Amino acid sequence: MTDSSKDLETIERTFVAFKPDAVQRGIVGEILQRLERAGLKIVAMKMVKASNDLLHEHYSEHKGKDFFENLIDFMGDGPVIAGVLEGVKAVSVVRKLVGATEPYEAAAGTIRGDYAHVSVEHSNKKDKAVKNLIHASGNLEEAEKEIGLWFSDDEIYTYNRADKAHLM
Ligand code: IDP
Ligand code: MG
């Protein structure tokens, strides 16, 4: 089966980063499995110890907020695993699988709901960022910016998944 131009219009790329808490807890594989089994294709992936500059740029929308410095400290606390996932409506599908920002209210069945439980209130009291395992682009514009920030074009691959006939 070949892609029709109509299919291609609905296929998106989104950026994800397994945060230092996911890497340090050894649950990257389990979380990634959830994304892969939904049919999302990994088109780029690497382990990165993000620089302060990269993190400031990545989270520029939050500059000036109370939690900004804690967030930068948290994300720079150890290596992250950054990736690009491709699929139909990938941006919103990944956000759905990831769940709400605050793990305590993220729905059961979502990554943040199943693997964490803390609240913003608790993290703020401890003067820490909310540890919620994974970053996922919030919209297409953010995805484009973040993919360009973390990956060069030659680090993003084109290939067919063997189960494509059933997924697309
Ligand atoms: P998102 O990751 O669900 O898109 P954003 O609002 O973009 O959530 O916030 C980015 C990250 O900053 C969150 O995932 C979380 O780790 C952290 N964060 C957000 N709000 C707070 C807060 O009020 N206190 C501490 N950390 C926060
Ligand atoms: Mg966000």
Image (spheres, grey):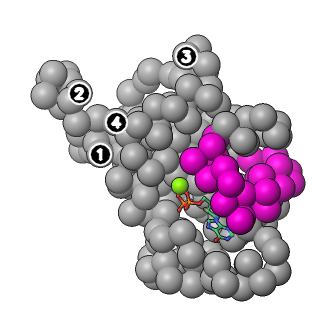
The answer to if 78 sits in the magenta stretch is yes
Q: Residue 8 has which mark?
A: 2
Q: Is residue 73 left or right of residue 36?
A: right
- State whether residue 164 appears in this view: no
Give how far across and how far down residue 75 sits, in percent.
Answer: 76, 53
What kind of residue is marked 1? Lys
Q: Secondary structure at mark 4?
A: strand
Determine which residue is flagged by label 3.
153
Image point (73%, 35%), residue name:
54
Indicate the quadrant containing the N terminus: top left, top right, bottom left or bottom right.
top left
Ligand 1: which quarter?
Answer: bottom right
| Mark 3 in CB contact with mark 1 (< 8 angstroms) | no
Give how far across and how far down residue 44 sits, in percent.
Answer: 57, 31
Gap in Å between the C-alphas at discs 1 and 2?
11 Å
Determine which residue is flagged by label 1.
89
Mark 1 CB near ligand 1 (8 Å cut): no
- Between disc 1 and disc 2, whose residue precedes? 2
Determine which residue is flagged by label 4.
12
* Other residues around mark 1 within 10 Å, as few (<14) / some (14–19) / many (≥20): some
User: Residue 27 versus residue 127: which sits nearer the camera?
Assistant: 127
State which region is magenta.
58-80
Gap in Å between the C-alphas at discs 2 and 4?
8 Å
Q: Secondary structure at mark 1?
A: loop
